[in-house]
Amino acid sequence: MREIRAWFLRLGGLFHKERRDAELAAEIESHLQMHIEDNLRSGMSPEEARRHAVIKLGGIESTKEDYRDRRGLPLLETLMQDLRFGFRSLRKNPGFSAMVIVTLALGIGVNTAIFSAVYGVLLRPLPYQDGGRLVVPHQQATQAHVSNVLFSAPEIADYRENNHTLDAVVEYHSMDFLLLGNDSAERVKSGVVSANFFDVLRVRPLLGRTFVAGDDSPNADAVIVLSYNYWRRQGGDPNIVGKVFHMNDRTHTVIGVLAPIPQYPEENDIYVPISACPARSSAKVIGDRSMHMMTVFARMKSGVPLTTAQADLNTVASQIAQHNPEFYSKEDGYALAAAPLKQDLTRRAQSTLLVLLGAAGFVLLIACANVANLLLARLLRRERELAVRGALGASRSRLVRQLLTETTVLSLTGGALGLALTYPTLALLVRFAARFTTRANEVRVDPVVLLFTLSVSLASGMLFGFLPALSSSRQVSDALKQGSGQSTTSMGRQRLRAGLVLVQVAVSFILLIGAGLMIGSFIKLANVDPGFSPDRVLTLNLSPNYNRYRTDQQPKQMLALADNVLRSIRNTLASTLRR
């Protein structure tokens, strides 16, 4: 209790300092007068009596300092003094301060922006409950070096029924359909999923509900779930649940809207159950083991490690190959590899983002070396100031701490400006990351990114400020002998500046070589001969109403449709040219 009371008294000593100092001065003066009067009564002269009284007290100023140290928190008070002095010193050199802050803002801002993408895509936990138990199985033709063969409906049924380590196995594939409203028609990208797809993800809808087991039955009413982004693009109607649309010659009712989460394995406008997809619900797809069109993922049982689940799936894959040798030849090889969902979502983005983060780190290193050189040049003008402060009693550590405080103020200001520059680039970062992963929408500035910016700012301040601060601690007498305004750079400082310049040049060359290689690769890719002239060439993607092509003659019907469309285009172009 006494220690806690002492700490509270020290905290109280930080306030009303002027009043406390006045009371202390009055008390010391009272004690001093008492000693002077005793000395006068012993026969001393007034001057001698005062001198002996001061000696007995141990020095008035030193006594005051000792009392202040016991009264308050000396480290905090010293830090506040250093901060005030640092701000005054930087205000006297606005050009130098602005140059350092802008240089650091660019370096820290680039690192913050890239880290926000790295954290949002690679490091942030999946927004699914128990996301570490979600895995993505990939069929492989090992001898043919094919690492991702899509699944057929019979294969999905085999893995669903014969495994012992998975809670659920669900499927997904994507198709484009024409969605007809009362006064609109739009081509939508549709995810066709198992009824328990969102239950396995453990995703709760923003509005309405997701699919249930009855939605997968052949005679079930057709229903759709809207993705969050598509719902927002359509106006974000809060009463959208229950509205009716027409698709594939059937009436579909909106039953829910998804929350804003990354979609797997790609972004879709809407989701429909298997029963609503003409292709997936056809007898040919249901019974044909060679119709590879679905992606699969699964949730492992609680407490089951990935290695155990992989061994279990290997056993099922071996049984499938043995029971169906006509579909799985030994020449091609057959295996199944399960990867964590987080890894599968980010595998295409990982190398690109890490390379960008490394390049951003080099940029920050160049900025720190540049700022360190500026600080060394500025110290040339401050040598006599530092020498005088040392002569007045400032220790070497005290001078180093003061210089580090100034550089930390600069780095934190640069970090704040760099963070402000990050926000306008977020939209660009999201568009860039969206080319590699559906987790791009999770790129944002959050507390983790703010903590990273603060850490980088402090580390940068220590990095570019520590060496110049140490180089400033020269012998006081050497600095004073140089004469006012005539200080010269020591050999040690010259070597330090040369080393910093060497670091800047070396890192700059690394970045330039990397940029040159990238530009060279881009030029080569742009000049690849495709074997035809791409000028004035158009492409056309046909997405017919699949309900009209559900017979055994589907391939021939689709080819006939394509021929009819091309014939109409040729006739239209010919008539246009004749005019």
Image (cartoon, rainbow, N blue to C red):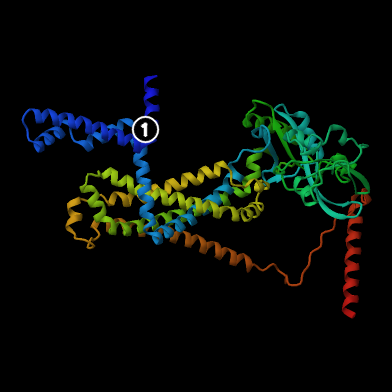
Position in image of residue 138 (x %, y %): 70, 41
Q: Which of 512 and 90 is in front in this view?
A: 90
Secondary structure under the numbered disc 1 in the rendered image: loop
Specify whether 540 is left or right of 219: left
Expressed as whole percent of the image width and height from the top left, the position of residue 200 reads: 74, 33
Specify few, some or many for label 1: CA neighbours under 10 Å numbering under 14, 14-19, or 20 or more: some
- The reply to whether residue 145 is in sight is no
Query: Residue farthest to the top?
Result: 1
Where's residue 35, x and y in %? 15, 29
Q: Residue furthest bottom?
A: 579
Q: Where is residue 92 in the image (x, y as percent from the top left)?
A: 36, 58
Q: Residue at (35%, 33%) from the top-left corner?
A: 72
Is 491 left or right of 195, judged from the image as shown? left
Q: Residue furthest left?
A: 43
Q: Is residue 396 above or below residue 199?
A: below
Q: Please name the amino acid that badge 1 sits on.
A: Gly
Rendered residue at 33%/31% (across/down):
71
Q: Nearer the viewer, residue 131 or 76?
A: 76
| Residue appearing at x 79%, y 64% in the figure | 539
**Residue pictured at 65% horizontal, 31% vertical:** 311
Of the 4 image quadrants, the one containing the N terminus is top left
Q: Which residue position holds label 1?
A: 13
